Structures are given as structure tokens and as C-alpha cells.
Amino acid sequence: MDTVHKHEFKLRELPTRAVTLFPARALVSRELKDLALRPGINEITIVGLTPTTDEDSIKVEGTGSAVISDISIEMLPNREIFEDIYPDSDDDEEEEVVTEEDDGSKFKASPESHAELHRLAKELVDIGDDRKLAQELVASVDARQAILDHQNREIKLTDPDHIRQNMEIFEKEREKLCHSRIANDKKLREMEERYQEAHKAWNVVFNSIERERRKFEIARQKADKAAAKAKNLEALRRAEVLAEKQRVRRERERFWPKVVYTVRITLDATAMASPSSSRRSSFASVADLAKPAPEPQDGPSSSGGGLVCGLILNYLTDAAFWAPSYDLQLSTTSEKASLLFDAKITNVTSETWSNCRVTLSTSQTTFSGLTDTIPSLTPWHIKLGPKIHHGKSSMSSSSFAAGNILNSNEEKSQVQSYKDYQVQKAYKQKPRTQMFGYQGDLQAPQAPLQDAMDLQVDSYLVGSQGRNMNQPLYEYQQQPFPPPAPAPAKSMRVPPGGTQNNNLSDYQMSLMTLEQQNKRRLMMARQSHDHDGAPQAAMVMRKKSREPEINEFQDAAVVFSEADEALADGATIIEAEPELDFQDSSVEETGLTTTYDLPGTKTIVPRPTPFKQRVARVTLSNVVFSHTIVAKYKPLAYLKARLRNSSPVTVLRGRAGLTLDGTFLGQTIIPRCSVGDAFTLSLGIDPAVKVTYPAPEVRRATTGVFSKEDSSVYTRVATVSNTRAAAGGRPVNVVVYDQVPVSEDERLRVDVLHPKGLGVGGPGVAAGAGAKAGDKDWGRAVATIKKNGEVCWDATVQPGKSARLTLEYVVAMPSGESAVQC
């Protein structure tokens, strides 16, 4: 048995050669260069294809000294570790702990003040001791004086000599005690004075130190507040950084694949040496025969016997696509428009396509659609059935008989088969909860939220299936994801040993939810279709829903109306600064497909929301602005712009931001417009054009005395005023619609009296007059009438002027009859 040399590569390590984005999917091309092979059988394994890959679209091409003999595709669990691919930097960052130093937080007096205070304190102690000694001496003198007095009173003498001798002794002792008392009192007073002076000096030094301490405490409190504020700010900053890291991590977890596709390519490096007739047929395709490579150069890639090859892996995924988006800037002064063409690119796969060429294509061809066969009509034979017994209502019986042959049996079968095919096509892919998500500790508490977000992405992708450039894209691209299904998240995560009934019930529940969301999109698409219909029906059926939009356009129109008046008054026009330029994409049209090659290389990372990429900037000239008025229903002038695509780029249907004379009006839908064709956009209500439409007048017509008819003349008048300044304003083109009743009975006649000469199918007649008497330069108007009674005035009203458009008709009927609406 031959030895199989195995080589394994991770898809994220392979460079992306090119990405081609379609409206509903993307074609990715990966490249494996300079692959050194060993003689014999080599097995190349590429691991990590996104689980949203279309398995049937995987194709391998190659060049080099080998033959592709076998290709196998298998979906396996993702063996990569999330933390290895996206390591957390939080573990490396240690929390900075601020340690408070004792020396800095406690007050210390200056050495001089501290030494002086210590000296004065010691001096106070010494003086206090001396003062206590003086006090003791004084007390001793007082005690001896008391003893001497007591002894003198106790002595009983009768002899005069003894008395005189005793008195002399008492006098001497008393004199000694008196001198001692005076000396001690003087010394005590000196000690008191010295103590007071020392104490006063001590207080001065102590108060000085205390003032310094209070200043230090105030400064320390301020510093503590500043430190606490800085600490709080740092904590907030760290919290913001942590929240952002968690957001990025959650976003990465949303696109972390649970399962991936693995492609194994078997290369036979010994087949090149054998004759071509003896080579074994390739299992993949006869086109997969590798081409001989040039002589290998000396280097690391030429090891292994000098056999080198290169592989190109192509595959389709329906989790990446693009849609057009526009920014339309209109100018009523220059009658030009600037159309910025952007591409909204969506990538909700698990792959990042780095530094690759990006091409946008409008091709709608899908791989699964190639198996559809063109249906052919089967003959529809009918015959008479059993008789219908007419009851009380013959109308219901006839309706029942007609309903039997309303649809053929083959038609019913084909329609039901097509509906089933659409459902299978929409829900062919597994729910994202089974393909994406990280089961780590950080994600585990957030599993319900993760499942709900994945269900949103499922609905988002299902809505993009089968979409084409002629359908409204704002249901899928502009609006946020629909609300998640209320299904419990834990049921979506079945352990390996669990039953399959939970998966089936959850899958059915998700299908029901997505079906409801698709019905919602269908209703929105119908509303968009009604928006493109007749203006009269739109104004009648959507009166309430258009009120906010009308107010918005009124405010915007006031802005550009005032801007026109400012320019008319001679306001200074400031020259605009040059805008940043960009490189346009190269455009190529092949049949029904248009491709746009974006300049340079791009990097497309998976993200939940689409991002914009500029494709082209188109300038459209000769924009025609006009007003439409249906005064009978609403006395308002609706502004419209007709644009002709004079650029070499086909304008695809998509949502656009609308700006008129520098004022943003809102969002609108631009229809598909080929090169050279024109399209019309509604710009809302122009308040600068005033419309008045009083109640119609009716009077009896003058007829003969013996006339058998009753005739009435009806008069309707619409007055259109161009309120823009006469000095610098521009005339406005208005189309005013009114109508006369159409008779369904030959005895009921309706004739138009004014404008004179107006007839169905006839040429337009001059009509209208100035609102003021003698006003001849108001403008002009031409009136026409259609078979359905619709009267149209195509008028031009000069600035500062008003036009009076009168419609007068007579209704005649036999006497005694009345006219009612059918």
C-alpha cells in the first residue's frame, strides 16, 4: 500500500485571492501557493470553511506537477479553540493598586518650628518647677508664721524680764519670716512673669504649626478628592474598555462556527511520470487535471523531490451579499443632480477576507436554480358537467359554475409545487444556532440572547434568498433585523444524547416565525408598489400615513424656498471648499449582468450590520422639476423631479437618501434605470406654490319654455400662485388635474363649456387667465381632456404671479330625473 503524505492547512491562514459579491450570495476564491509535494499520494486537508458554504459549489483548481484524483467534503465540529484565536488581553493587564504612603498622608512640621516648640515646652516645664518651689517657700513662711503666733499665744509669763526677752525673740523671728516672705513672693512673681512669657511664645509657635497643619489638611482633602475623581474616571474608563472588549467578544462569538466544512484533496504526484493513457480518471472533474509547472527554483518551496503545485479553492456562500445604496443631491438652481452610488456589503459568515480584490455583480443566477426545468403548457380540456339546479339566487349558481374552470388542475398542481419549492429553498439551510456560537463560560449565561440574535440573522438571510435587483431592497438592507422568535433558547441546544423531537418542534416554530416576518415584508413591498402607482389613488388610500412625510417635506421646502429668496436679494455666494475625491470603480456590462471592480484591495470582516463602500459618483444634468396638483382632493402642489441617466452606469433599484438644495428630505426608493432612460421621483409638497380651490358653483342653464330637459351649469376654479420672488425667482411648471362626470346613460349629457373647444381626443387648447384683472404676463396653460373625464392643464406660472384655471360644464337630463354616481 502506498504511503499517503498528509498536509493540513487552516482556512484562516490561506490568503484570499478574490471575492465576488452577488445580490444573494458571494463567491470566495482562496489560494494555496507553492505547495511542496512528495512523490506518491499526497492528501491536502483544508479545514475551516464557513458552515454557510454551499457544499455543491466547492471547486478546486490547480497548477503544478500533480493530478487531482479525489475530492471529499465533510462537515466536522470546529476543533479550534476560541481563546487561541482571540486571546483575552485582560489577563495580562494587572490591576494597578495605589498604596497610600504614611509619610505623605500625615502632617509634619518644619524642623525649626518643631525644635522651637520643643525648647519652649522644656522652658515652660523648668519655669513651672521654679514657680512651684517659690510657692512652697511662701507656704513654708506662712506655716512658720502660724506656728510662731500660736506659740506666742500659748506662753504664760508674769515676769517682765521674761516677757521683754520673749518679745524681742518674737520680733526677730517675725522680721526674718517677713523678709523671707517678701523675697519668696518676689521670686514667685518673677516665675509667674517668666512662665507667662514662655507660654505666650509657645502659643505663637504652636498656632503657627497649627495653621500649617490646617493648610496641609485642606490640601490633602483636595488631593484626596482629586485622587478619588481620577480613580473613578479610571474605573469608568476601565469599565468602558471592558464593555467594548465584551462587545467585541460577543460579536466574535456570534460568528464563531460550531461546525466547519473540511475539504480533502488527493493529489497523485506519480501520475505525471506515467503515460497519459494509463492515468486514472479524476473523481472531481476532468478539468481538474493539474497543469505542469515550470522548473522549480532552489529554495524552501522546492524541497521534497522538486514537486510543487498551487491550488485555488472556490466556493459559494449565501451568508454574504451586497445591495445598492444611494445619496441623491438635487439642486433646483443649477437643475443638476449628484448621485453617490454606494454598495452595502453584508458578511455574516465565520470568515474574514483580508486584502483581496472585491467585485460586485448583479447576476441573479444561483446554483440551485440550474436544475429548474422550463415548464410547458398542458392542453386544457373542458366539458359540460352535471346541470346546476337554480335556486333563489341564479347569480351564485353562475359564479359557482364559472369557478369550476377558473384554474386548471395542472395549474393548481404547478402553483403548489412552486410554493413548496420556494419554502424548501428558503429553509434549506440549518438555523444559525446549530452552526454558530461559542459554548465557553462567558457565553453560557447569555445563551438565550445569543439564540435570539442568531434567529434574527436567520430571518435576515432567508429574506435575502431569491432576491433580485428589481425588488425593493429596503425591507432587507435598511431596516433592522426583525424581532426574535419567542422560542426558548435552551431547546435549540440539544446535547449529543438528546431526542430529535425538540429540534423538530423548535425548527417548526422558527419556520412559523419567519413565515410571519416574510408576510410582513410582502405587505411592505405592496405598499411600496402602491407608492409607484397612480397619484390620485395614492393620495386617497394613504392620506393618514403620509401626514408626517408631508410635514417633513413642507419644512424642507420652506428652507429651499427661503434660500431662493435670499439668492434673489443678492446674497453673497461663498465658494465651496473642494471635496475629498475618491477613485471610481471600473464598470463592465456583459449581457444582463453588470460587474463593478472596487479599486485596491479590501478587507471584509464578519459583522452583524452591513457597511458601505463607495462605487461611483454620477452627475446628472438637465433635471426637470415639475409640480402636480389635484386640487379637487387636496389643494397642494407636489414637487417631482425627472432625471435622465446620462451616465455610463446603470442605476439599480435601491434606497436613497434625498437632499434638495442642501436640505435633507428623507429616504426614497430609486427605481432601476438603464443608461439613457429616465425616472421620476416625488419630492413631497412645495409650500412656495399656493393652491386655492373654493367650493364649486352651480346654476340652472337657460332653456326654452317648452324644453323637456333640466340643465345645470357647474363651475370649478383652481388658482395656482407662484410665491417665489419676482426678481430672482424661476417659473414653475405645474400639471393641474380635475375631472368632469362621465355619463353612463345616453339620456344624461355632460358637455364642457370652458375651456372652449375642449374635446376628447382633440388637440390641447389655450386656457387659464391671470388671477388679477389685466394681468397678461402670468404665464401660459394648455388644457386637454381624456375619455374618462380627466381634465389636465399643463401650465407655466411666472414668479410672483397667479394663474386662474376655470372648468365649466353643463349636465342635462330629462325633466323630473336626477343624476347619481354609479
Image (tube, rainbow, N blue to C red):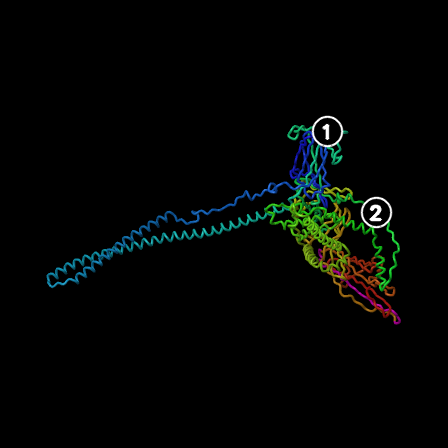
Question: Which residue position holds label 2?
Answer: 376
Q: Circle 1: is it few (<14), some (14-19), or many (20+) Cα within 10 Å? A: some
In the image, residue 417 lies in the stretch drawn in magenta: no
Most foreground residue, 133 or 409: 409
In the image, residue 709 lies in the stretch drawn in magenta: yes
| Residue 459 in sight | no
The location of residue 471, given as percent across then percent down, is 74, 50
The quadrant of the image that shows the N terminus is: top right
| Residue 207 in sight | yes
Q: Could you tell which of marks 2 and 1 lies nearer the N-terminus?
A: 1
The location of residue 244, given as percent across then percent down, is 59, 47
Left or right of 109: which side holds 39? right
Q: Give the quarter of the image for residue 815.
A: bottom right
Cα–Cα span, label 2 and label 1: 49 Å
Most foreground residue, 103 or 406: 406
Amino acid bearing label 2: Ser
Question: Which residue position holds label 1?
Answer: 272
**Label 2: which secondary element:** loop
Q: Which residues are magenta?
A: 705-728
Q: Circle 2: is it few (<14), some (14-19), or many (20+) Cα within 10 Å? A: few
